[in-house]
Amino acid sequence: MTAYWPSLTVIPPVGVELASWEAFCALAMEAGAAGFEEEPPTGEGVPERARFGFAVGESSDVCDYPAVEAVAELARRMLGEAGLVQTPAVEPAVDWVARWREWFHAGPVTPTLWVGPPEERPAAPEGATYLAIEPGSAFGTGTHATTRGCLVLLERLVRRTGPVRCVLDAGTGSGILCAAARLMGCEQAVGFERDPLAEDNFRLTMELNGCAAGVLFVPAGDVEGARAQWQAAGWPGPDLVLCNMLSSEFDGLLGALRRLERPLLLSGFLCEESAAVGARLTQTGWRVVERLALDGWEAWRVEPA
């Protein structure tokens, strides 16, 4: 039986801010998109257009895929009406993993930390830590500036103070940060993620990096859900918190993360958002101790004030 892939092309309006576009993409994934492909970005960092793909089905009728209209309506509300949403298409399914492999290759995050597919491990120089990621669903491959920023700050911290005993990764996705922490000597890692579809990708990342033991995946969207799991496992709780989310997503977590009384590596916000994020951190009891900017995005190490 033929498998069909529904898709929707969205064209950002002229002048839309990158933060608004990134927020729309994140919400589109929550509304049912399985992934998206952007055409080359403009000088402002916003693509000319993006094609959103949805779960493959057996129907060639777009009406049988309600998530497509949900994302189209989201685009109209967040980005405007005129000419932004093209007519949805339903066509024979695309092998997204094969497409991903065309461009995802091993490369350095730092001279001593490389990320790439498992079969390209030999490309890393001798002595470098290699973080293996299998291209799959859109839960991250470590190439985005926000993830790279967290990885750089994590490596700096470990080099300065030694491996931490346990980390908590808020919004873990594919588990890249949990796996990196384990490869850097962390004994335990807890990742929580409200998207249950991320769990298989998370566990695959752990297996590829030889760190399936000593990790917990928590299908919850808050700190308390994660706390219940690590306490049930008899773990004492994290010494370091990692959080790589859009600012609209991590804002509501800052108070709960602050109550853990642990340092935090925070990323997912644009350089122009720095003042607003800094003010919010101050309001919730944090102080910034280290800043890193990569490709227009910020990653900060913050501590309880």
Image (cartoon, helix red, strand yellow):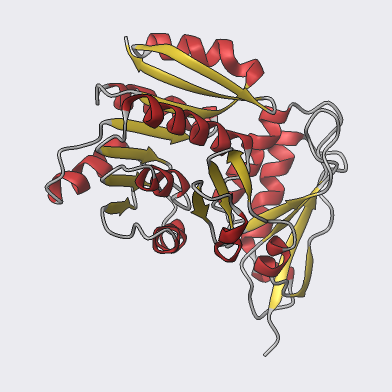
Q: Is residue 34 left or right of residue 191?
A: right
Image point (64%, 52%), residue name: 70
Q: Is residue 120 left or right of residue 192?
A: right
Q: Residue 192, percent across and down? A: 35, 46
Q: Is residue 123 left or right of residue 230?
A: right
Q: Nearer the viewer, residue 109 or 26?
A: 109
Q: Nearer the viewer, residue 148 or 137?
A: 148
Image point (58%, 66%), residue name: 119
Q: Residue 89, percent across and down? A: 80, 65
Q: Quadrant of residue 143?
A: top right
Image point (51%, 29%), residue name: 267
Q: Residue 183, percent across and down? A: 39, 48
Q: How many marks?
A: 0
Image quarter where the C terminus lies is top left
Evaluate whether residue 141 shows in this view: no
Evaluate whether residue 267 shows in this view: yes
Q: Residue 66, percent across and down? A: 63, 62
Image quarter where the N terminus lies is bottom right
The vertical placement of 68 against 114, above or below, is below
Q: Quadrant of residue 221?
A: top left
Which residue appears farthest toward the bottom when viewing the image? 1
Q: Nearer the viewer, residue 122 or 115?
A: 122
Q: Is residue 289 left or right of residue 304?
A: right
